[in-house]
Image (cartoon, coloured by chain):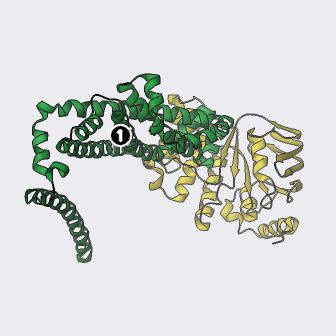
Chain colours: A yellow, B green
Amino acid sequence: MSKILSFENVSLTYQAENGEVNALNNINFSVNEGELVSVIGPSGCGKTTLLSLIAGLEQPTGGRVLKRGTTGYMLQRDNLLNWRTIRANVLIGLEIRKMKAPENERYVDSLLAMYGLGDFADKIPAQLSGGMRQRAALIRTLAVKPDMLLLDEAFSALDYQTRLVVADDVHRILKREKKTAIIVTHDIAEGISMADRVVVLTKRPGTVLEVIVPAFANPDATPLARREDPAFRAYFNRIWKGLDVNV
Amino acid sequence: MSEARLLYLKQIKRRQRWIRFFQFSALILTVALWEILARVGFIDSFLMSQPTRVWRTISNFQQNQLFTHIGVTLLETVIGFTAGVALGILTAFILWWSDFLSRVAEPYLVVFNALPKIALGPIIIIWVGAGMQAVIVMALAISLIVTIMEMLAGFKNADPELIKMVKTFGAGRLQTFVKIVFPSSLPTLFNCLKINIGLTLVGVIAGEFLVSRAGLGYLIVFGGQVFQMDLVMTSVIILGIVAALLYRLVALLEWVVLRMLTVN
């Protein structure tokens, strides 16, 4: 497997009016092609910053981020535009990148059809359920055929039940489309159940505490099924203790 | 539909009918009272005019060239309104683009906004000449600053999450504006247009008071000077109707645009 992304001693310090903020400190890890990697850490530990670095929205102040190919970003909220139909919404990335060719539009239509939104293409976002909206947001990200997907707390705006189902959905879609993805979450269970590898960050300034490769009895189990696996609890406890959460 | 539902809908309808009825009655009553009081001599129709005299003035439109005056006021309003909106949006766009420029301009905008623009009358007349152009510039002076401030606030209010979403696709500033900022400011734009119709009319009438030889504002001043209160009252009433119609036109435009946007 070839590496698609690697962080080499990456640090990032923000300059703000009331002082310096050391967001990330000496981060090292890498991601292989086709791998789903989750990044778990307490809130405010710089998880989102990590994604911004990968997407190129920000530059590190120390070390380097090496990546191959393009990235697609999925945010916490679906951010569907209520003045566009679902189809027009998922095409926005292609419009912006001036890639709105017929074959790309066909690809988008096939994604919509494959993932249960074919009949909703001409509806407006308000007519869809939360789970469907989030699926539309994922298709919008997939439409530009990114080599790597960045999911930033992509399920945390959904209610608990929807969230479990959507996480299952997204996992299935990512595996089927053979995508590489980095899933940032503060939800330990979500992080373990969805990923091939888990990167645990410490609180700010964020640095890598450990990297776990969860092994389950059935390697092809869905995220929901993985939660039933006896090993799941052990991983959960290990990460929970490591995070050392104080409230 | 259940019985309770039908009853509920009926109640709403009935209430609506009563509101319409009283709105209409208030108008009829006022006009009737005005006419009666003038006829019995309780009010002086020379000073207060009276509905039948207003009607006579309107029917006499060929002699007093009423429609020419309405046309002039309308033309000035449409030009002033369009120019104000276009210039206002353009300026707001530039200030949105450059935060630095926006910070520099801020105190000046505040001062110009507070300044009574009528005070600029003599300056405007000397600079652009007494005539229709002065009226239009006056209308522009009154509506422009409000448009800039409103639209800039609207642009700056666009949801940062939506902006981040398009940025993750590599959108530049212009694309961000076209895809997110402008469409999400449409409600602000239409509010602004509705306010502007009124403000532009204020500017046009004030301008006509100062310089013009035609228009409803001119007619009002002229009527006042020669003590023809019929002409003054008629002009004011027509002005009210014109203002209401223009407002409805903007509301209609809003309805059409918002519908087009959600349908496509």
Q: In this view, does A134 lie to the left or right of B203?
A: right
Residue toward you, A88 or B53:
B53
Residue sitting at x 57%, y 29%: A99
Determine which residue is flagged by label 1: B201
Pick the quarter of the image with the C terminus of chain A: bottom right
Q: Is residue B250 left or right of residue B126?
A: left
Percent of width and height locating residue A179: 69, 43
Q: Mark 1 lies on which chain?
A: B
Residue toward you, B139 or B2:
B139
Q: Quadrant of residue A195?
A: bottom right
| Residue B111 seen from this side | yes
| Residue A84 seen from this side | no
Residue sitting at x 11%, y 45%: B55
Q: In which quarter of the image is residue B112?
A: top right
Which secondary structure, mark 1? helix
Percent of width and height locating residue B224: 25, 41
Q: Quadrant of residue B98?
A: top right
Residue toward you, A185 or B195:
B195
Task: Name the amino acid, label 1.
Answer: Leu
